[in-house]
Image (spheres, rainbow, N blue to C red):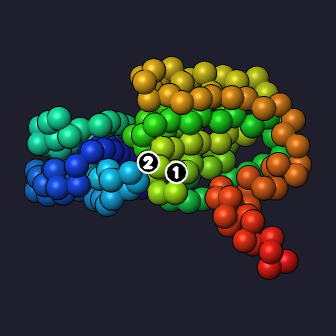
Amino acid sequence: MDPALAIVEFDSIAVGIEAGDAMVKRAPLGTIQSGTVQPGKYIVLIAGDVASVEESLAAGRALGGDALIDTVFLPDIHPDVVAAIRGDRAFDDGEALGIIETRTVAAIIEAADAAVKGASVTAAQIEMADGLGGKGYALFGGVLSEVEAAVASGVAAITEPQLIASVVIPQLHQEMRDDVIASPFFWERVHGSEKS
């Protein structure tokens, strides 16, 4: 796993591609992944050693100009957040569920990293961008007091305009937990139940 990660979001696809090219040319990276997301945004994710990611991010910010929506630089990203970004789901039967919802992908990654570093919780799931209108949300499970602390830490890490909502649900009902675990997308839930 690369020690550092950065995400840059643009409201212009053309500028995003140009900036991504500049970023990968600026410094050697372990990972670069980029692409379009709804509604017409472009996201560049990079990972590698701290100095290279920081240098590459500077190039993306410089080229982004007015097209820059949001950025995050995490020089020591938590491994659970990396796993959740990759799609791993770690639901447990913890007594509480915490949710943070943001307007951008960068903000949800920053909030999730702060949340799992700020309390003893499981980063159960991170959903972002596609199918969400470019938004993101993260789910955390564990003991109620720890989930409350995690959500507070995550919210404190991001700027107010990026936060949509944060909630802590004690004793999530089992049927709701099953739905959340099965799929975050309503169509998949409805369509899947028709085949049963």
Q: Position of residue 119 (x, y in %)?
A: 64, 28
Q: Residue furthest bottom?
A: 195
Crowding at dot 2, Cα within 10 Å, few <14 / some 14-19 / many 20+, comes out as: many
Q: Is residue 117 left or right of residue 74?
A: right
The quadrant holding residue 115 is top right
Q: Report the quarter where the N terminus lies.
A: bottom left
Front-most of residues 84 and 77? 84
Residue drawn 85% across and 77% down? 196
Whether residue 101 is situated above or below residue 32 in the rendered picture: above
Crowding at dot 1, Cα within 10 Å, few <14 / some 14-19 / many 20+, comes out as: some
| Residue 194 in sight in this render | yes
The amino acid marked with disc number 2 is: Gly
The circle on residue 132 is 1
The quadrant holding residue 160 is top left
Q: Position of residue 150 (x, y in %)?
A: 63, 28
**Element type at marker 1?**
loop
Residue drawn 78% across and 32% down? 169
**Element type at marker 2?**
loop
Q: Position of residue 35 (x, y in %)?
A: 31, 60
The circle on residue 157 is none
The quadrant holding residue 110 is top left
The answer to whether the residue labelled 2 contacts the one labelled 1, judged by CB atoms less than 8 Å apart, is yes
Residue drawn 60% across and 59% down? 88
Residue drawn 75% across and 37% down? 97
Q: Position of residue 81 (x, y in %)?
A: 52, 46
Alpha carbon separation for disc pair 2 and 1? 5 Å
| Residue 77 in sight in this render | no
The amino acid marked with disc number 1 is: Leu
Which residue is label 2 attached to? 134
Front-most of residues 28 and 179? 179
Whether residue 6 is situated above or below residue 17 in the rendered picture: above
